[in-house]
Image: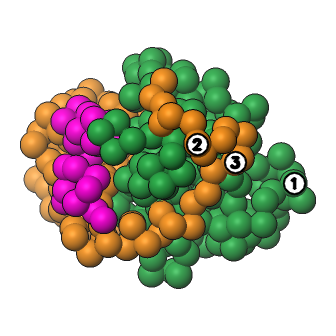
Chain colours: A green, B orange
Amino acid sequence: MTGNDLPANPSVLNTTVLSNFAHIDQLWIVADLSGICTVPVVREELEHGVANHPYLQEALDALDDEIPVAAISDTVANREAVVGEHLDPGEAQAFALADAHDGRLLTDDGDARSFAKDQGVTVVGSVGVLLAAIDAGRIDEATADEWLSKWIDEIGYYAPYRTISEYR
Amino acid sequence: MARITGSYPDDLDLLIEGAVEAGVFGGKSDALREFVREYFEAHENERIAAAVALYERERITLGDAARLAAVDRWTMRDILREHGVELRLGLVDEDDAAYEVEAARELEFDDEDSSDEEPRAK
């Protein structure tokens, strides 16, 4: 995927949302989002982690066909270099792409979320994806509650409410 | 590159000076870098403890911690949980949750499945 192929307002993934949905074997939800894409460094991070965390293979398999990996233009690379002082490599590249193309960053990483908000770039995390999926009729609330509980109990995800209805 | 000022016993200083004179190290800084690097390579637990402590104090990110501990991000996440450290992963508080609800309204799904289908969970 080149810069010219990018949707107008892309939803750019770092590793966190990708790996959360891979962990529960429900990556199809993320892949169905309009304008979804990720960046080359995220692929590298997944490749680095997959040996010890085999469930990440599902995320790797989804890249390219279901979840495009955007090419990084010089403009994005320059922005990435600047924000790289504040963010991890995957987050920096994903943020730079979202910022340059008037998109949003899909992340659950607290440090990246704070930074993106400060910079005026919209961030959405795994809970936001669940909320959107319910509104679109893709899943029901009971399913979303079950998945959210798994993240909280199994991978250390923090959320102020355990049930989706409390977010409304 | 960081600078550290410290003091150590005279004999250690002489050994370092002598090693530099003997061509073992290019200079005192090279020697000190080598000592610290060797220590953390040989002491994995201390390396991990350092990464955990800095993440817990919000001095570094998860990715930084993983790099310092020489593990992948997901292993670092597991290590932090084992140490009882609260991860900065997810929604911080009620305000962040309210933000998330608004931000989620921007998300749309591709129209490949009709919305009158039964909700599914693969």
Q: Residues within 10 Å of mark 1 (few under 14, many from 20)?
A: few
Give the Cα separation between the discs numbered 3 and 2: 14 Å
The amino acid type, in three-letter code, at marker 3 is Asp
**On the image, numbered disc 1 is attached to which residue?**
A5
Q: Secondary structure at mark 2?
A: loop
Q: Relative to B6, say whether B113 is above or below.
A: above
Q: Would you say residue A158 sits in the magenta stretch?
A: yes
Is residue A74 visible in the rendered image? The answer is yes
The label on residue B110 is: 3
Circle 3 or circle 2, nearest the eye:
2
1 and 2 marks on the same chain: no
Is residue A42 visible in the rendered image? The answer is no
**On the image, numbered disc 2 is attached to which residue?**
B116
Q: Main secondary structure of the magenta part?
A: helix
Q: What x and y, as percent, mark residue B19?
A: 36, 40
Q: Earlier in the sequence, mark 3 or mark 2?
A: 3
Q: What x and y, as percent, mark residue B14?
A: 23, 49
